[in-house]
Image (cartoon, rainbow, N blue to C red):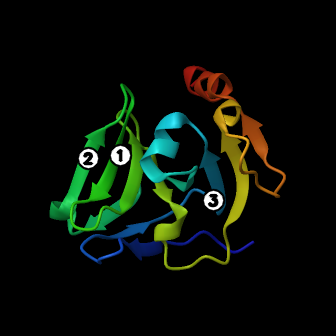
Amino acid sequence: MNAITEQSGSCLCGSVSLVATPKSFHVGACHCETCRKWGGGPLLAVECGGDVRFDGAKNISVYNSSEWAERGFCQQCGTHLFYRLKQGEMYAIPVGLFDTNEQWELTDQVFIESKPSFYSFAEHTRNLTGAELFAQFSDE
């Protein structure tokens, strides 16, 4: 696999661009109700820790989506820019924002118990329920 390097991308209209260094080339799919309402389907995202830089930040609006997280989007075109934890350094960046796409690999699915039956992925992934996901954070 390729070495992890900075990845760049932007929203649809170009008002917001970003540079991030992913923790890996692994893509996770979140099937929770909030993610599905936010984007009309699962959120396919890359974990980037806190190493994310935005240009055009004045065009970013942030929605307080839960007690522990918030979501950012472009005020101009509505593109989803990030999901981030309120505490700690964790950004999940939608993989489709990045300019390159050949190195990504779908490896994880979370809130698997919330996935509707009308879609599925062919890749063999690690699947976690919401409870299993939250248990990982409580152990840290």
Residue 19 vertical placement versus 48 (above, below)? below
Instruction: Check disc 2 and report the residue beneath it.
Output: 62
Look at label 3 and name its amino acid.
Answer: Ser
Query: Residue 93 at what x, y percent from top left?
Result: 47, 57
Instruction: Check disc 3 and report the residue beneath it.
Output: 24
Query: Residue 118 at what x, y percent from top left?
Result: 71, 47
Instruction: Check disc 1 and report the residue beneath it.
Output: 71
Q: Nearer the viewer, residue 134 or 89?
A: 134
| Mark sitting earlier along the chain (3/2) | 3
Dot 3 falls on a residue whose secondary structure is loop
**Quadrant of the rendered image containing residue 133:** top right
Rounded to the nearest angstrom, the CA distance separating label 1 from label 3 is 21 Å
Dot 1 falls on a residue whose secondary structure is strand
| Mark sitting earlier along the chain (1/3) | 3
Any part of residue 49 in sight: no
Is mark 1 in CB contact (under 8 Å) with mark 3? Answer: no
Q: Nearer the viewer, mark 3 or mark 2?
A: 2
Residue 20 vertical placement versus 133 (above, below)? below
Residue at the (57%, 25%) spot, across then down: 140
